Image (tube, rainbow, N blue to C red):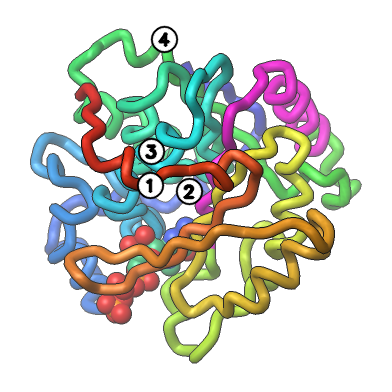
Amino acid sequence: MIDNQENSSDESESPLLLTVEQFPKSMRKYWRSRYRLFSRFDDGILLTQELWYSVTPEEVSEFFAKLLRATIKDDKGPIVDLFCGGGGNTIQFLRYFDKVIGIDISKIHLQCTLNNTGVYLSDKNFKDRLKLIQCDWSHSLGTGDSMDELGSSNCQSTIKYLKEQRVEAIFCSPPWGGPSYLKQDYYDTDNLEPFDLEQLLLSVKDISSTIIVFLPRTTRISQIEQVTERVFGTDAHVRVFRLYVHKFFKALGCCWGEKFDSLNTLSMFDMEAKY
Ligand code: MGP
């Protein structure tokens, strides 16, 4: 089920964080938001410390899944959830699409994704529709540390596989560098991990021409536009959604690709999907 593409040791993985007693004080707000992150939290959701602050709130994940469903009429290939983390987005993509590929550097994140997807989907055949791949995306541009040739070749074989799948869309929710991004007035997309926004777009644009990147709400639109021009040319444009949860502005959803030009967002409102 989980393709172990890296030979990473589990010792560096962050442990599961499951009860309020285990929470550092600075992170209690995430515990209070647990049902906004996962409405079915009590049914067995598993998250690590890193996942608590980076998982996409369910309302936003469902918005992304509906947005892609409204954009992609006749899907033949899968949706890729790059940096799938705790699986919040993967779950919603599986509700609206037949096939999803989740990719993450961390084995424990992939295990959380698998577990959390099982909490939501009653269709027990979902495992046939979901492929999880452990891959360190920092090797995707072939510029990674040459000492780690194994990681590099594993990442290249993942990319080769993705190109064969005719991926319909690639959704990226990369690490922003932790919650401290909120201490700055503006977020600089050069601080994204494993590399900046320009490199991230370069690393995915040959896998699918339909791309979404989830970014901090404090990112300047002008920076997103400049990167768009550098990667896709002067005629290219990006569609940016401001994402709210219970009226609070949480993040930006940035969409690239011709398919978003003709998108009718009204069609998203009466969509229904399976659990
Ligand atoms: P937040 O950054 O803690 O801001 O989480 P919040 O809750 O608005 O803070 P407040 O103190 O102003 O209330 C907002 C959302 O951003 C989270 O639920 C995640 O979906 C997302 N998010 C936060 N971080 C640090 C990351 C990250 O590193 N990567 C990704 N992909 N998403 C993140």
- Above or below 29: residue 169: above
Q: Secondary structure at mark 3?
A: helix
User: Which residue corresponds to mark 3?
Assistant: 65
Q: In the displayed structure, does residue 117 sit left or right of residue 98?
A: left
Left or right position of 135 against 202: left
Ligand 1 visible in quadrant: bottom left
- Residue toward you, 242 or 110: 242
Q: In terms of depth relative to the viewer, which is nearer, 77 or 241?
A: 241
Of tags 1 and 3, the one toward the viewer is 1
Among the two numbered marks 1 and 3 on one chain, the one whose residue lies closer to the N terminus: 3
- Whether residue 259 is in magenta: the answer is no
Q: Which residue is mark 4?
A: 128
| Residue at image point 30% right, 29% down | 117
Residue at mark 2:
13
Amino acid bearing label 2 = Glu
Q: Residues within 10 Å of mark 3 (few under 14, many from 20)?
A: many
Residue under numbered circle 1: 265
* Amino acid type indicated by mark 1: Thr
Ranked by sequence position, the earlier of labels 3 and 2 is 2
Please name the residue shown 34% across and 43% down the image. 88
Bounds of the magenta span? 151-175
Mark 4: secondary structure: helix
Dots 4, 3 in contact, CB < 8 A: no
